[in-house]
Amino acid sequence: MARYQRLHKSGQLQGRVEQAVSRLEHCDLCPNKCLVNRLAGEVGKCNTGRDAWVSSYSLHFGEEQPLVGSHGSGTIFFTHCNLKCCFCQNFSISQLGEGRAVTGDELAKMMLSLQKRGCHNINFVSPTHVVPQILEALELAVDAGLSIPLVYNSGGYDSVETLRILDGIIDIYMPDMKYSNDNYAERFSGIKNYPERNREAVREMYRQVGDLQLDDLGIAQTGLLIRHLVLPEGIAGTYDICKFLGEEISVDTYLNIMAQYRPCFRAFDHPELSRSITLGEYREAVKIADNFGLKNLDSIKSRTTNRIMQLFED
């Protein structure tokens, strides 16, 4: 039974929905704390008012193997974002607003449709700014039979207060850990205090779900999965992030050290970000993780080694 089913059965899910929706009146869902009245249609940094916007939903096979399995991860890509990353590879969705507004009923039907198509989980991509809308739809979807795990796939700029509303609802947390330097975070993603807020969020996520747990088929059921994109010139701060995970979270943390950075969107405005990473930079990041005892990288590396090598050869 998924965590949210138990909460729904106990009658507590409705209270969480009401709690989350009330936060929209003076929106402080994320660390940006814009305090606009989204219930009245005002928008803050995420450019989203009362309704969630969705760009697409589908079975996705490009996620981590424990999420994809044999039938795919049921991804719902939300439009807009609470970060403004100049190098975002999905900038047409996150920055340019590709998508449309959806009602709670429509969002619930998307979840149910994906489940009917056999996916292993419902994967909310960039959900930070639309937590209340997700919960409204979830209540409808559970009533109609939704039962598979939920994945919270965020940029990692999350509020602990909002995450506590999700305690007992989200089965799998998959945040980014983008930076360990405040100046880089503000310069390249337009956000303040990212490392501190990010680590607070990861601690809370881990408190709720612990290490990633797989079933007999290797499919994730609950737990924490971290994504860390290696950036040129050490901008991502891999050393400090791995040190934090190894010493303050768990050496069993499932960590995806990603090699696919390439200049996109406005990255060419910044000389440091105007090139792809080198094979040496990627290998150094993996070595750092290993030095801090983070061993849960094998399935990631075995799945992507050939693709990564081809990337560097090109």
Image: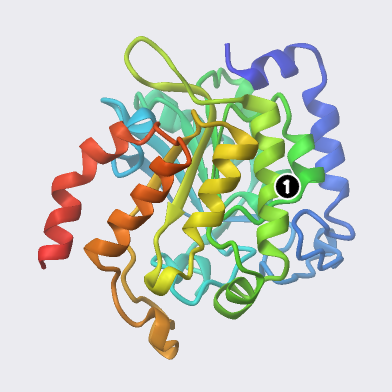
| Res. 290 image quadrant | top left
32 or 80: nearer the viewer: 32
159 lies above or below 26: above
As drawn, is 32 to the left or to the right of 219?
A: right
Q: Amino acid at mark 1?
A: Glu
Q: Which residue is mark 1?
A: 200
Measuring from the top left, give residue 169's x and y in whole percent: 68, 27
Q: Is residue 60 above or below residue 196?
A: above
Q: Classify residue 79 by image quadrant.
A: bottom right
Callout 1 secondary element? helix
Left or right of 227 in this view: 152: right
* Residue 177 in sight in this render: no
* Quarter of the N terminus within the rendering: top right
Say if 129 sits above or below 313 in the image. Answer: above
Image-quadrant location for residue 305: top left
- Residue sitting nearer the eye, 153 or 26: 153
Task: Residue at 75%, 71% (x, y): give it.
Answer: 44
x and y percentages locating residue 300 in the rendered image: 31, 38
- Residue at 30% x, 58% y: name it: 282
Give the residue at x 37% y 28%.
66
Percent x, y of residue 23? 86, 51
Out of 119 and 215, give the one closest to the viewer. Answer: 215
